[in-house]
Amino acid sequence: MKWKRLGLILLRFTILFAVSATLVGGFWFHAELYKLGLPAIMVAGPIIVILMILAFRFAISGEFRLVMKPKMSLAFEFNDIEKVRHGVKTSMLRKPQGSRDIKPGSVVTAKIKGRDVGICNVRIIGIDRKYLADFEQNDLISLGIVSEAELSDLWTGLGGQMDEGEYSELVFFEPLGKEKRT
């Protein structure tokens, strides 16, 4: 594992060196490119700039992507957004995710389901993975609900079946800009 990481670091620094050398050499080639005429400059210039940007992005992030990864977000129902903003709803129920992209301490955007507009930022406090049978009254209150019937409706809305053996994730968060409630 260490050799693979070392190889990736070496590759990234090699690419940074090559891009830097190309940019320094570009000053000399710039004068030579004018001799080829305007059409050559209009075609070659943007291609070289795009390649330089892609190379820098790979060297900095270690990932080759034409489109950058969007910021992490949590999608809420329209009715829950005000509860999230004011700290009444402090957790979110979701099906277990294969990849653990959201980690405690990270800041994510709260969005309305189906819309791409961020409403507010929240800090992830923790993630609790538990069976539905193990839910306690405090878990229900943090979800902004008061009964197991509402939990059942919430879980079936996520595409699950209300079975005590179902495994879920509770994502605990706090809105940013508010004082912590004790």
Image (cartoon, rainbow, N blue to C red):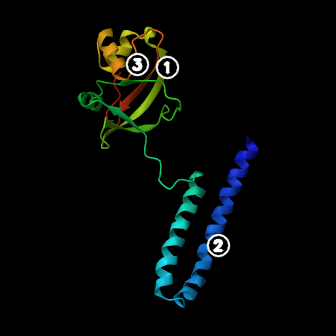
Q: Residue furthest bottom?
A: 35
Which mark is first along the chain, 1 or 3? 1
Does residue 143 appear to the left or right of 26 in the view shown? left
**Disc on res. 129:** 1
Residue depicted at x 66% and y 68%: 18
Which mark is first along the chain, 3 or 2? 2
**Disc on res. 143:** none
Marks 2 & 1, CB-CB < 8 Å contact: no
Residue identified by numbered label 3 = 160
Residue identified by numbered label 2 = 21
Q: Residue 19: where, in percent of width, then height?
A: 61, 68
**Identity of the amino acid at label 1?**
Arg
Q: Residues within 10 Å of mark 1 (few under 14, many from 20)?
A: some
Which mark is first along the chain, 1 or 2? 2
Q: Secondary structure at mark 3?
A: loop
**Identity of the amino acid at label 3?**
Gly
